[in-house]
Amino acid sequence: MANAKETLKIFFGYDSFREGQEGIIESILEGRDGLAIMPTGAGKSICYQVPALMLSGITIVISPLISLMQDQVKALNEAGIHAAFINSSLTETQIRKALNLAAKGTYKIIYVAPERLESYDFIDFAYHADISMVTVDEAHCISQWGQDFRPSYLKIVNFIKNLPKRPIVSAFTATATEEVKEDILCILNLVNPNVTVTGFDRENLYYSVENIRRKEDFVIHYIEKHPKDSGIIYCATRKNVDNLFEALYKRGVSVTRYHAGIDNETRKKNQDDFIYDRAPVIVATNAFGMGIDKSNVRYVIHYNMPQSMENYYQEAGRAGRDGEPAQCILLFSAQDIVINKFLLEQKDFSGLDDEDAELVKQRDMRRLQTMEGYCRTTGCLRNYILNYFGEKTAMPCDNCGNCHREYKEVDMTAEARQVIQCVAETRGRYGLTVVLGTLAGADRARLRELGTVNYKSYGALKNTGEALIRSLISQMVEEGYLYQTEDKYSVLRLGDITPLGDENARVVMRTYEEKEPEKKKKPARRKNTDSLTAAGYDLFEELRKLRLEIAREESLPPYIIFNDKTLIDMCVKLPKDEHDLLQVSGVGESKLKKYGKRFLSAIKAFTDARQRSLSLYSLGE
Ligand code: ADP
Ligand code: ZN
């Protein structure tokens, strides 16, 4: 029998495992339960698909979303693997047929929605079949702490318990918080599990926050500069989606849209247009994206600040799943905080008792504040994200908007002392607006009424400018000098650390110099296509055309045929025969058989038409 690495090569065409994959697979093959926490795009599917092919029986994969299952099954079939899904998109007859085939051992991997685990026919099938493994995909759906809690996930446990022989149970998620992890381990009853948490960093993603008001202009300009790229633009509300969509559409952008207010059929069509690259740009609310595995998304722009870092990281993480450089840009304006608070206040807490509702509210507020911190931080954005997910970082990444921005460092220790003085004088009773107004020496009835006009700190920073004081306070909250309470009437208090009494303590603020946008947004890493010469790029375009042609014939999304990375590798390696072609990353035996000839002859036609000596690959970085 082939080992794991051979299986990877034969079916998926990859030469090596990525971080974490091999350990997870080995542990499964030893018969051990496991939980793997890996960021979106890290390659979770391989971690259960490879062992599924090597175990003697069937692997059942529980997955929350129909579109996700369909995509996975298509991709597996393309790789020459017998797989099927069973969910409500099939008719009763189709389900019966699939179960019959499954009972005969036709499929190695079967995807099901959690609801299916209660159906008599399915239980009956599973009881009599040889089930080697049950894999729980998107395992965080089992936790009430997460935002995607699905009660039907709780049924998994009973289903497993009732099987005649306990299968290996493996669980996968991208949600890293401690509460969720504990919930998964505990609720799923994992036995002596191998828990793997891989690094959360996605090196190919370039993060930036743009503090701007004219967001629409920004997006239009960005798309004009990246006309060939596929991207997602997330908006907070349906209205924003519709407005931005109209604006882009009028300008002739191949754009589509997605939100819960659009009827099912149109939504499905729009989603497909995006996936099949008929409309490479989509404007959407956060209803869009779960289970979208489009690998060539080159940018994700957030038109509004999302409600939490968890949401942000997941949505932004849909960029660059092929490992190629991609941009995650958050357009921030103070208005976003108002919108988000409003949305949180509208949230439906029916079904929760008052105490729980209050807890959830506080948690939501805390998440919002962390998100706001990301938008306002002047430090490294990547490190901010990684620290939030519990990873220690040492150096700034030199691959994010803040690391690339030019800034001035200004010693604001004296001003920080005044802020502390003022907050001390309020005795922690007032919020940001009052503290700001007092320090700036504003002439407001409210301040007279509260008596802060009599403070020593009143007007102490009147020459500093409110915007700068605001950033200073936000930085002081982040650094722990101040503490901002999380309830609705958020007030400022003195923080846990008070080293400002210490002579040597310094509060240094970075203020940005306005720079040319070109310079500001230039990613440190170059796209892989940059390594191609002009001729190589022409071939890449040719191969893309061929891929699109095949995709249309087969009614498959282009990236399921081959992803961009594979096409680029072809342009670099210029395979002459099947043996060469197998060396290209992403070409496995099944795809070689199906598409090899056509790609080889396209490459041959192209190179023949050029001089032999012409190099398609520019050597050196
Ligand atoms: P996740 O489920 O973790 O979000 P996927 O399983 O969809 O990520 O994998 C993301 C992409 O990475 C897919 O296109 C997949 O084929 C690719 N991939 C996974 N493992 C490897 C590997 N070892 N080598 C190269 N590409 C890989
Ligand atoms: Zn950075």
Image: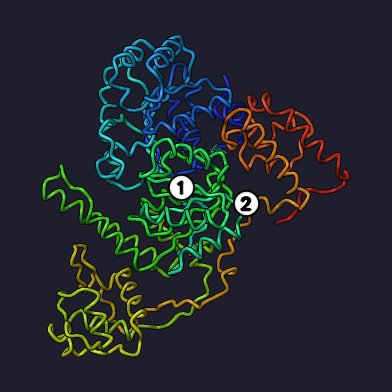
Vertical placement of residue 251 versus 435, above or below: above
Quadrant in the picture for residue 481: bottom left
> Could you say where residue 67 lies in the image, as x and y percent from the top left?
44, 33
Q: Which mark is residue 487?
A: none
Kindly give the residue lying farthest to the front in the view shown.
250
Vertical placement of residue 519 versus 277, above or below: below
- Of 245 and 329, which appears nearest the observer? 245
C-alpha gap between disc 1 and disc 2: 18 Å
Residue at mark 1: 257
Q: Quadrant of the C terminus?
A: bottom right
- Of 423 and 314, which appears nearest the observer? 314
285 relative to 107 in the view: left or right: left
- Secondary structure of the residue carrying tag 1 is strand
Residue at mark 2: 228
Residue 506 visible? The answer is no
> Could you say where residue 227 lies in the image, as x and y percent from the top left?
61, 54
Quadrant in the picture for residue 593: top right
Going from N to C along the chain, the mark reached first, 1 or 2, is 2
Vertical placement of residue 149 versus 111, above or below: below
Name the amino acid type tagged 2: Lys
Q: How is the image coloured?
A: rainbow
427 relative to 539 in the view: left or right: left
Q: Nearer the viewer, mark 1 or mark 2?
A: 1
Dot 2: within a 10 Å radius of its alpha carbon, few (fewer than 14), some, or many (20 or more) residues? Answer: few
Residue visible at 71% across and 39% down in the picture: 543
Name the amino acid type tagged 1: Arg
